[in-house]
Image (cartoon, helix red, strand yellow):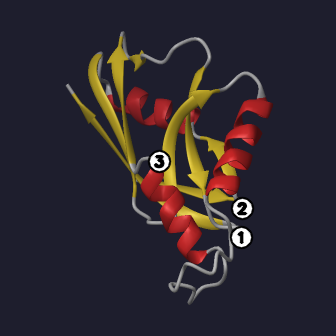
Amino acid sequence: MLRIETPGRGLLEITREVEDVVAKSGAIAGLATVFVRHTSASLVIQENADPSARRDLDAWLGRLVRDGDPLFTHTLEGPDDMPSHVRAALTATSVGVPIVGARLGLGAWQGIYLWEHRRHGSVRELLVHVGA
């Protein structure tokens, strides 16, 4: 299990941490599956070259699902509570990446990202399963 501390809302690259798990597993080929154990964060594979792409994604999702929307009744933890759940539902709680030659088979500009949907930081738990 990986424990990743997030600084708050946004995309945080976790490719290196997942690569470390794959390397320690000794797998030459197979599939690495990453699963986030939370309902207000998600996982995506996205461009890792230009940070503006990640900022634009986060801004777009923020326009689509706004904090404090009066439609939401699930607000126990604040105005970003239900919007965080909706954002996670619209993205993914797991990603699978092929293992090729003992490495993640990501493209040249791809990285694995933990997408924190809450405004405040948190410690997120991720399960990484490596299967041959």
Q: Which residue is mark 2?
A: 8
- The amino acid type found where label 2 is placed reads Gly
Comparing 19 with 44, the one in front is: 44
Residue drawn at point x = 66 percent, y = 58 percent: 6
**For marks 1 and 3 on the same chain, the one whose residue lies earlier in the sequence:** 3
Q: Residues within 10 Å of mark 3 (few under 14, many from 20)?
A: some
| Residue 109 percent location from the top left of the image | 62, 17
Q: Report how far apart the C-alphas of labels 2 and 3 lie in the structure.
A: 17 Å
Is disc 1 surrounded by few (<14), some (14 to 19) or many (20+) residues within 10 Å?
A: few
SS of the residue at dot 3?
loop
- Camera-near label (2 vs 3) is 3
Snapshot quadrant of residue 15: top right
Residue at x 56% of width, y 66% of height: 84
- Give the secondary structure at mark 2: loop
The earlier-in-sequence mark between 2 and 3 is 2
For the point 44% across and 66% down, the residue is 39
Identify which residue, 2 or 92, lies in the foreground: 92
Q: Position of residue 112 (x, y in %)?
A: 53, 34
The vertical placement of 27 against 84, above or below, is above
Cβ atoms under marks 2 and 3 closer than 8 Å = no
- In the image, taking residue 35 as reference, residue 65 lies left or right, namely right
Residue at 76% x, 41% y is 55
* Label drawn at residue 120: 1
Vertical comparison of 89 with 104: above or below: below
Q: Is residue 25 left or right of residue 126?
A: left
Q: Position of residue 115 (x, y in %)?
A: 58, 50
Mark 3: amino acid: Thr
Mark 1–mark 2 distance (CA, rounded to whole Å) = 4 Å
